[in-house]
Amino acid sequence: MKELLATLYHQRMLVTAAILFVIGFGGLLFNWNLIKKIVGLNIMDTAVYLALTSAGYVDGRAAPILSDPSVPAKMSQFINPVPTGLVLTGIVVSVSFTAFSLALTVRLYRKYGTLYLDDILFRAKRSVD
C-alpha cells in the first residue's frame, strides 16, 4: 500500500490531469447547457496541457535557454522543449476555438432564445417542418 501511495505521489501531476480530464468529460457529456459544455471542454484541454507539461519536466534540469552561446551545452542539462511548444500551440488553438464556440452560442441564443441543446434541436426541427 505504501508503494502505491508513493507512486501516486510521485505521479501526482498525471493523477491530477486524469482527474481534471474526467471532470471535464463529465461536464461535456452530462450537461445540456452549451456554456457548460464549453467550460467542460476547456477543463479537458487544461488536463491535457498539464499532462504534457509534466511529461516534459525532469527534476534538476533547466529550461533550454543558453545565456552564453559560446559555451557548448550538454543536452542532459535541459528539459525537453517539445512538450512546452505543444502546450503553447494548444493554448492558442484552445482560446481560438473557445472564442468561436462562444460566438456561435451567442448566435444560437439570439435565434432560439435558449442555451439548452435539446431545446435548440427541438426548435430547429420544428422550424424546418
Image (cartoon, rainbow, N blue to C red):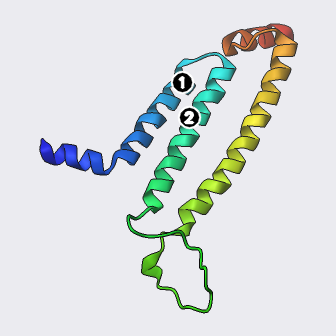
Residue lying farthest left? 1
Q: Nearer the viewer, residue 51 or 113?
A: 51
Q: Nearer the viewer, residue 30 or 72?
A: 72
Q: Is residue 129 visible?
A: no
Is 41 placed above or below 73 here? above
Q: What residue is at 81 percent from the left and 8 percent from the top?
A: 113
The first of marks 1 and 2 along the sequence is 1
Q: What residue is at 71 percent from the left and 48 percent from the top?
A: 93
Is 10 placed above or below 103 here? below
Residue 16 located left or right of residue 52: left
Mark 1 touches mark 2? (CB < 8 Å): yes
SS assignment at label 1 = helix
Residue 79 located left or right of residue 107: left
Q: Which mark is residue 48?
A: none
- Quadrant of residue 15 within the rendered picture: top left
Using the numbered discs, state the Cα–Cα distance from disc 1 to disc 2 in whole angstroms: 9 Å
Q: Which residue is mark 1?
A: 27
Q: Which mark is residue 43?
A: 2
**Residue type, numbered disc 2:** Ile
